[in-house]
């Protein structure tokens, strides 16, 4: 559900410009890793901004950090 919500704004996107520095993947092959990074950081970001723990509100795979 989180990945879907993060990706939702991209549905109408006609063009994506990726800017990369350093080593690792470049171009479109980098996009899945960037999306995964956003989804992985989201629970901690939500808690930092709102004080609400995602693990308390959504127990299970989304909130499970083990």
Image (tube, rainbow, N blue to C red):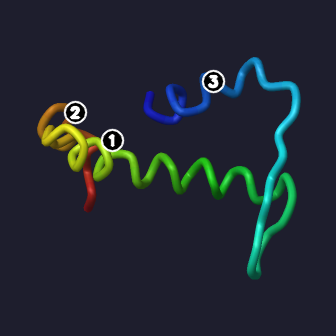
- Mark 1 Cα shell of 10 Å, populated few (<14), some (14-19), many (≥20): some
Q: Residue at x 52, y 35 (%)?
A: 3
Left or right position of 27 against 22: right
Real-space CA distance between mark 3 and mark 1, rounded to the nearest whole angstrom? 20 Å
Disc on res. 9: 3
| Of residues 19 and 32, the one drawn nearer to the viewer in this rendering | 19
Q: Splitting the image into 4 quarters, where does residue 16 fall?
A: top right
* Labels 1 and 2 touching (C-beta < 8 A): yes
Disc on res. 58: 2
Q: Position of residue 32 (x, y in %)?
A: 69, 51
SS assignment at label 3: helix
Instruction: Decide which of tag 2 and tag 3 comes sooner along the chain.
Output: 3
Left or right position of 33 against 31: left
Eyeballing the image, is 20 above or below 43? Answer: below
Eyeballing the image, is 26 above or below 60? Answer: below
Q: Which residue is drawn at 16% across and 43% down?
A: 53
User: Which residue is disc 1 drawn over?
Assistant: 62
SS assignment at label 1: loop
* Labels 2 and 3 touching (C-beta < 8 A): no
* Labels 3 and 1 touching (C-beta < 8 A): no
Real-space CA distance between mark 1 and mark 2, rounded to the nearest whole angstrom? 7 Å
SS assignment at label 2: loop
Left or right position of 20 against 65: right
Instruction: Decide which of tag 3 and tag 1 comes sooner along the chain.
Output: 3
* Quarter in which the C terminus is drawn: bottom left
Q: Where is residue 38 in the image (x, y as percent from the top left)?
A: 51, 49
Real-space CA distance between mark 2 and mark 3, rounded to the nearest whole angstrom? 23 Å
Disc on res. 13: none
Q: Residue at x 18, y 43 (%)?
A: 55
């Amino acid at each position: 559900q989180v990945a879907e919500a993060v990706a939702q704004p991209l549905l109408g996107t006609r063009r994506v410009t990726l800017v990369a520095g350093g080593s690792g993947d470049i171009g479109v092959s980098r996009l899945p890793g960037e999306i995964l990074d956003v989804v992985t950081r989201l629970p901690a970001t939500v808690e930092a901004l709102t004080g609400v723990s995602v693990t308390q509100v959504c127990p299970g795979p989304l909130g499970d950090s083990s």
